[in-house]
Amino acid sequence: GAGVSQSPRYKVAKRGQDVALRCDPISGHVSLFWYQQALGQGPEFLTYFQNEAQLDKSGLPSDRFFAERPEGSVSTLKIQRTQQEDSAVYLCASSLGAGQGYGGRGFNEQFFGPGTRLTVL
Amino acid sequence: DQQVKQNSPSLSVQEGRISILNCDYTNSMFDYFLWYKKYPAEGPTFLISISSIKDKNEDGRFTVFLNKSAKHLSLHIVPSQPGDSAVYFCAASAYGAQKLVFGQGTRLTINP
């Protein structure tokens, strides 16, 4: 079946512009994550949804960043008044479950999309 | 602070030999560890994982070792193949949390 898709793949924005990045998770996946990957670094967690509920937004760097998943499937990450330091690859990942599994606590493999490369000029 | 560290930015190995990628972590609450592989312009793809109740997990050419006392894990690839050339990320998850904490990555190059 189809994997996680993200659009646009590339986005160039002028400083101060608002941008919206879209993520289509694998159908039926309960959990959805957003990560930010700066050049030469590993992905860093931004926020996590279980269905439509945003359970963790501790990684969002400022109140300019906002994410939603209103119907528990597609998600949008919005960045208002973009700054140069927002330039990065934004990765979306989804997983089937929400933590059930071995030993009373499981882990569900996260499947990543190709990312959106955001460049803020 | 960097809770997951991959201290080698790059590694070059001859085809057919063993590749060993290392990862250190500082958070004692981490109880699940994963390795992801990433090609350019693609998202990371899951490779292999290990829970803290084990010290070794093997899947074909890939083996992950976990040393909890040293807070260290390693990924062994035997034999290394040209298609293994990619950036490898170590990641960890704490009990009760869903998010992954990633290392900085190691670029592996397999030379023919």
Image: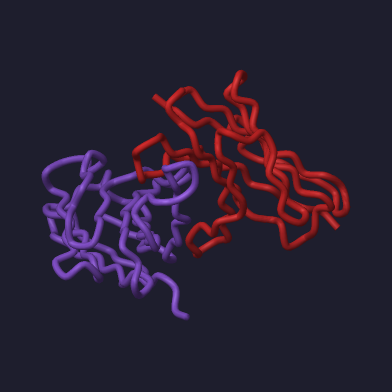
Left or right of A102 in this view: B96: left
Give the quarter of the image for residue B67: top right
Relative to A36, does residue A28 appear above or below in the rendering? below
Q: Colour of chain B?
A: red
Quarter holding the N terminus of chain B is: top left
User: Which chain can be seen in purple?
Assistant: A
Residue lying at 71% horizontally and 41% vertically, measured from the top left:
B11
Q: Nearer the viewer, residue B42 or B70?
A: B70
Looking at this view, name the residue that lies furthest to the front: A104
The image shows residue B10 at horizontal and vertical percentages of: 66, 40
Colour mode?
Answer: by chain
Q: Please state the total of marks drawn on the protein image.
A: 0
Q: Is residue A50 left or right of residue A111?
A: left
Answer left or right for A54 relative to A7.
left
Residue A20 visible within the image: yes
Q: Position of residue B5 (x, y in %)?
A: 53, 30
- Identity of the residue drawn at 77% across and 44% down: B19
Q: Please name whichever residue, B36 or B49, is drawn nearer the observer in this view of the structure.
A: B49
**Residue B65 against residue B38 in the figure, above or below:** above
- From the top left corner, tell me how far across and down residue A89 is, in percent: 37, 55
Q: In which quarter of the image is residue A62?
A: top left
Residue B96 at what x, y percent from top left?
A: 35, 38
Who's the residue at 39% across and 48% down the image?
A37
**Residue drawn at the location 37% of the way across and 50% of the way down:** A99
Whether residue A121 can be seen here: no
The C terminus of chain B, quarter of image: bottom right
- Which residue occupies the extreme top position in the image? B69
Q: Which of B104 and B52 is in front in this view?
A: B52
